Image (cartoon, rainbow, N blue to C red):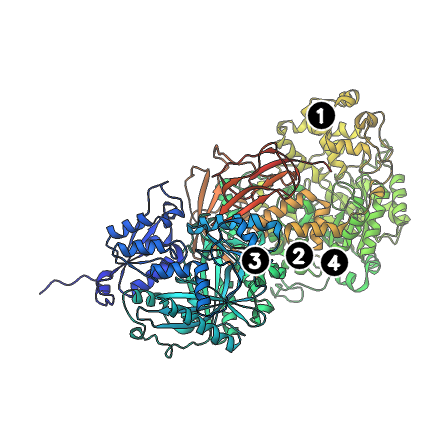
Amino acid sequence: MPPQREHSVETIRRSSEVMGSLRKLMVVNRGEIAIRVFRTAHELSMRTISIFSYEDRLSMHRYKADEAYQIGKLGQFTPVGAYLAQDEIVRVAKEHGVAMIHPGYGFLSENAEFARKVEAAGITFIGPSANVIESLGDKTKARQIAMECQVPVVPGTPGPVSDYSEAVSFIKEHGFPIIIKAAMGGGGRGMRVVRDEASLEDAFTRAKSEALSAFGDGTVFIERFVDKPRHIEVQLLADRAGNVVHLFERDCSVQRRHQKVVEIAPAKNLDNAVREAILNDAVKIAKHVKYKNAGTAEFLVDNQNRHYFIEINPRIQVEHTITEEITGIDIVAAQIQIAAGALLPQLGLTQQRIRQRGFAIQCRVTTEDPELNFQPDTGKIEVYRSSGGNGVRLDGGAGYAGAIITPHYDSLLVKCTCSGSTYEVARRKIVRALVEFRIRGVKTNIPFLQRLLTHETFINGNCWTTFIDDTPDLFRLVRYQNRAQRMLGYLGDVVVNGSQIKGQLGDPQLHHEIEVPVLRNNSDKGMGDVSAPLQDGWRKVLVEEGPEAFAKAVRKYPGVLIMDTTWRDAHQSLLATRVRTIDLLRVAPATTHGLANAFSLEMWGGATFDVAMRFLHEDPWDRLIKLREAVPNIPFQMLLRGANAVGYTSYPDNVVYDFCAKAVQAGMDIFRVFDSLNYVENMKLGIDAVKKAGGVVEAAICYSGDVSDPEKKKYTLDYYLQLTQELVNEGIHILGIKDMAGLLKPEAAKMLIGAIREKYPDLPIHVHTHDTAGTGVASMLAAAAAGADVVDAALDSMSGMTSQPAMGALVAALEQTNMGTGIRMEDIQKLNSYWEQARLLYSCFEANVKSADSGVYDHEMPGGQYTNLMFQAQQLGLGTQWRQIKIAYEEANQLCGDIVKVTPSSKVVGDLAQFMVSNSLTGKDVEEKARTLSFPTSVVEFFQGYLGQPVGGFPEPLRSNIIKELPRIDGRPGASMPPMDLAKLKEELTEKYGGSIRDYDVLSAALYPKVFADYREIVQQHGDLSVIPTRYFLKKPEVGEEFHIEIETGKTLIIKLLAIGSIGGDGRRDVYFELNGEARAISINDKSAAIEKITREKAKPSNPGDVGAPMSGVVIEVRAKEGAHLKAGDPVCVLSAMKMETVVTTPVAGKVELVPIEEGDSLSSGDLVVRLVKDSA
């Protein structure tokens, strides 16, 4: 029995050979065209060979061939030069038995000398003869041939133009505009439109230089420029026997910088008579020169339907794909077989048999950034997901994850060609195909292509060659969020470097998802459906009847109402305000039912506003809007710091008014308006702003001292009654007593609330306290008994110590009295189970406060500040001196004049206390040395009067000694501030961040400019981080652990950490994830690595004299010299990237101080190229 034959690719090819002895084909090119030719060669059972430069050693075309050989040794040729090294290429071809060479397009495809060398070596050149390449490839000779055939041409120079003076002579005869073209190439390189004499010489020089770089020949010629023409080209095939056929026309009018962007076949809206004339003229010229193989005749059609021959490209074109789609003819196969000696009739290619069907459109997807004037982008493709489906064809060369895009070559990534029965079907199909692409790691022009394909002019098929330049509306680009990849960047950083959230110590103690409680429906004895938000509650009264009626209803309520602080002050006091929106949203459905009779949920304002942006990287307005939707029935309450809004300083009045209006619009109901010094002038502004916004005004008196202690003379019962009267005079809806330190003892509560209730029987009273000393429940019960309508509490697991009293204890104590809260104990326990787990989840932010501290009656430190100040002390290296800080806090308070202490005045006292401890100062030392000490800014500004006027005024001479010659403010700080131009600020933010800027964002930037800018930077880098489950936001997952992130309703990312790579020489690690089943690698800078890295100085945007590189590229010419004086617009250097040259100019006039670059330097975008000392105005 004979041995069985082993099957392989080679045996398959040999069984179906069609090329005879011509079995080995080399493509002298790279990228997508090389792969395109290999595919057809393989279909013809041929063996393929690729060549590559050293820089291209990892490119896909190398391993798509059967054999691959590097041209030259490292450093022998430039990246482009390797593909132009004729003798070396021919040597390699002969050495490896190549029978045929296909040149592709670009590089040597139109080089007659190379064609001769190939033929001389006994190798078949796939293309026209060297003589034809010479006659047609040289555009000036081609024009002469066209005129001999009586084919119309655009007026131009009779031959090549080698000298600038010849260009001037042509212009004197024909005028502007003109177009300078490379005689030996195409693709937009070496081409410049010139409209005036001022730019002529530079354009001429640049065109010659670019042509020499791209094609190895700097010859150019000049034509009169035809304004707004269509660019129509004809695909030709011809054989050695003189047979010539056309494959109809293509419309290549959509161009940028004379390089085609989108091509269409056949041309839509082209007059049939013009079409026939163009097709006939193309065939006429090809026959005249005895053309052989594939070629393209190109024409312009002006607005009067006159056509002009411009050139014949004696090679395959980039856009040949659309012709193949409408005719069904493989043009590359025809090229190979014609070169092998086949005649067109033998291939079935006669004009009568060639038919077209439908339309095809091709888009060139490039690695260019449309928003930066199509600056080529470089780097590693991190994600590559292509389109597909019926009628979609992709021709690519570097389109895969992991591909490195270098600045050495053309920016083409993939050609997407779609076909359909009509133009509109094809257009819709290619729009769909582009939407399916996901390319991450480098910028692409896909957003621009989508905008172009959906523009009315393109839809109607009426584009012209300068359509892109003439239509700025095209640059209102489609925005891609790239959410998954950016989010992986954050997760990867957590994996490598750990969480970077300030204040975090260790990892969360909870290692599973929090279980969401299921509550029993009020109207059902069973569990019932409580998943949908409840509509009944106190907010319904407010919405339907307004703030005044709401306040009256609260006052009439027979029991005591509860405000739950769990969503704000409780976690501010216990967990450094670090609870995230995602965890509030998870418990919101249960809360809307369980606390349906609550007076309000305190959930916004105060520290939550800036902490959301500063540390949690989420938007505080989004928090309010999302929670409002989830909880429609319970009023929301916030802290408003009077004239300080939610900031720590004074703002122009219009900012406060606009903030309140937008807060109500977003869903806020009740504003607890206070001033950190009880300065009524500051409070008046907030009160009026809330009224005008339609919110409920709860004016709050900040409680300090002890009204039950007759020895304390400053903050007496009379003081508080007088303050209440002033606020009542302002027409407030509710009076708040804000006991921010927990100083309100039960007896004091009875005295204070009782006196206010007696004097103001119709005024609703709301009491807030902290349980720092452990008397919170007793004090709230005393306040309720004395006539308070609302008291504050937190769910049990989030209560006690520096937080609020326990809700369960309060409700249970009031349950059997006539002061019931309307909240069920079983619901409190169910909600409490959620927050018990949440407390473990956020355990890494615990302040480690283990017990009550009755010392608060001495130091009077607010509950929210207590834990924050403890953390700050640790960060400053004062953690072991916490006892001394509490003592110093008491002294600092007296130095400030025994002030009311609540943010921001409490920060002043805290900063001064830490300053004293860190510098070993006593109160007496501060008084004696005040003029020589450098106090914290907050302290200086307090004594200047930026927070307002404290009760009893500022202590002298300490005030004068601290502020020295600085200005002092003796009234309301914001009264003299001019209005902020919010419209202008929005324009500036829109220019910086794009059209996504909302009015909410403008207010965030107005209140916290630096915090907002840092937050937006994080968002731009990592996207919306608020959707990441907290466990993975704060802690890295285990290798192999799978978790889910819902980025929007119905869209869930399934993520698994696969591996963590070793550290590289650049100090980075690759982190490997699986995202929705697809492998992703993220490169992360390892901050623990000590890497010495040479970096170039970046141009500073703040210095107008710094000129930065507008794109990555190689410096090919330096024009600026140190010490020289330049005018605005003068060139400083020339950069080359992807064979495109760019002259970098200075935007300002000045003297050159520094030129840190040399010819041959590789630059990244933004690198400093020149520094000038700007001329004074």
Direction bottom: furthest residue: 352
* Depicted 1159 relative to depicted 169: above or below: above
Q: Residues within 10 Å of mark 2 (few under 14, many from 20)?
A: many
Q: Amino acid at mark 1?
A: Met
Residue identified by numbered label 4? 665
Q: Looking at this view, is 27 or 1143 the one in front?
A: 1143
Name the residue nearer the viewer: 1174 or 710: 1174
- Give yes or no for contact between labels 2 and 3 (Cβ–Cβ under 8 Å): no
Q: Which residue is mark 2?
A: 627
Badge 3, how many Cα within 10 Å: few under 14, some, many 20+? Answer: many
Q: Would you identify the image quadrant in which residue 108 lies? A: bottom left
Q: Real-space Cα distance between discs 4 and 1? A: 44 Å
Q: Which residue is mark 3?
A: 178
State which mark lies toward you, 4 or 1. 4
Q: Nearer the viewer, residue 799 or 1060?
A: 1060
Which quadrant, please, contains the C terminus?
A: top right
Residue that label 1 marks: 916
Task: Kindly check if marks 3 and 4 are in contact, taking CB atoms under 8 A apart as contact.
Answer: no
Which of disc 4 and disc 3 is earlier in sequence? Answer: 3
Label 2 vs 3, first from the N-terminus: 3
Could you tell me if residue 517 is visible in this image? no
User: Mark 2, mark 3: which one is toward the viewer?
Assistant: 3
Q: CA distance from mark 2 to mark 4?
A: 13 Å
Give the amino acid at mark 4.
Gln
Q: CA distance from mark 1 to mark 2?
A: 42 Å
Percent x, y of residue 274: 51, 75
The Cα atoms of the two marked residues, 3 and 1, are separated by 76 Å
Q: Earlier in the sequence, mark 1 or mark 2?
A: 2
Q: Nearer the viewer, residue 267 or 533?
A: 267
In-image side of 335 versus 213 (left or right): left
